[in-house]
Amino acid sequence: MKIAKLIAAVAVLFTVTSCGSISKSRSYSFDDVRLEMNMNDLQYLGEQEISIEYTSYLGIIKSVEKVNGETYNPVNKKVLTMPRSCNFRNRNLDKAAYKLVETFPNAVYFQIVFETKHIDRLFLGSVHKECAKVKAYKLVK
């Protein structure tokens, strides 16, 4: 009797495992396109330093004081969002990046050379100064 139950269980097990099948097919179309360039295809236009200075209270409240050395006016905002390949580590520098396009209107490629951040600790707050140096390039025809 036990052998019959064992044989029936094994038969059910084989039946259940043989019912399912997975098949995947993939077309030969390309998902992404790559453009390969080298430094001979780009012309160096120059480099620009951008900066932002803001105060933070209790780690929650932020108030922007200066952008690129000028007093910040939140009514007249200028923001430049860089492409994914050229993002600043700190998103606050996006408020200062507009100066890059104003200085180099023909540039098509920006390379972030370095970013610095200086924090002065205060009682219940801090003053943050962030700077970035960015090189600008355009395509050679």
Image: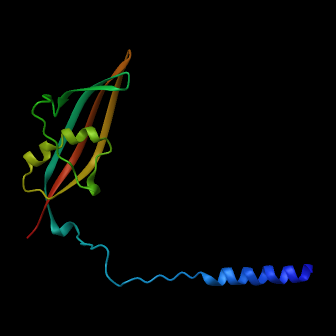
Q: Position of residue 35 (x, y in %)?
A: 24, 72
Q: For the C terminus, give its image quadrant.
A: bottom left
Q: Position of residue 97 (x, y in %)?
A: 18, 43
In the image, residue 39 sits, relative to residue 18, either above or below, namely above
In the image, residue 32 sits, relative to residue 11, either above or below, namely above
Number of numbered labels in the structure image:
0
Q: Position of residue 54 (x, y in %)?
A: 25, 27
Looking at the image, which is closer to me, 20 or 2? 2
Residue at image point 34% right, 27% down: 119
In the image, residue 24 sits, relative to residue 130, either above or below, namely below
Question: Residue lying furthest right in this view?
Answer: 1
Q: Position of residue 62 (x, y in %)?
A: 29, 27
Question: Residue lying furthest top in this view?
Answer: 123
Q: Horizontally, is 22 left or right of 133 in the view?
A: right
Residue at image point 11% right, 30% down: 75
Q: For the N terminus, give its image quadrant.
A: bottom right
Question: Residue lying furthest front in this view?
Answer: 1
* Snapshot colouring: rainbow
Residue at image point 27% right, 73% down: 34
Residue at image point 37% right, 26% down: 59
Looking at the image, which is closer to me, 84 or 47? 84
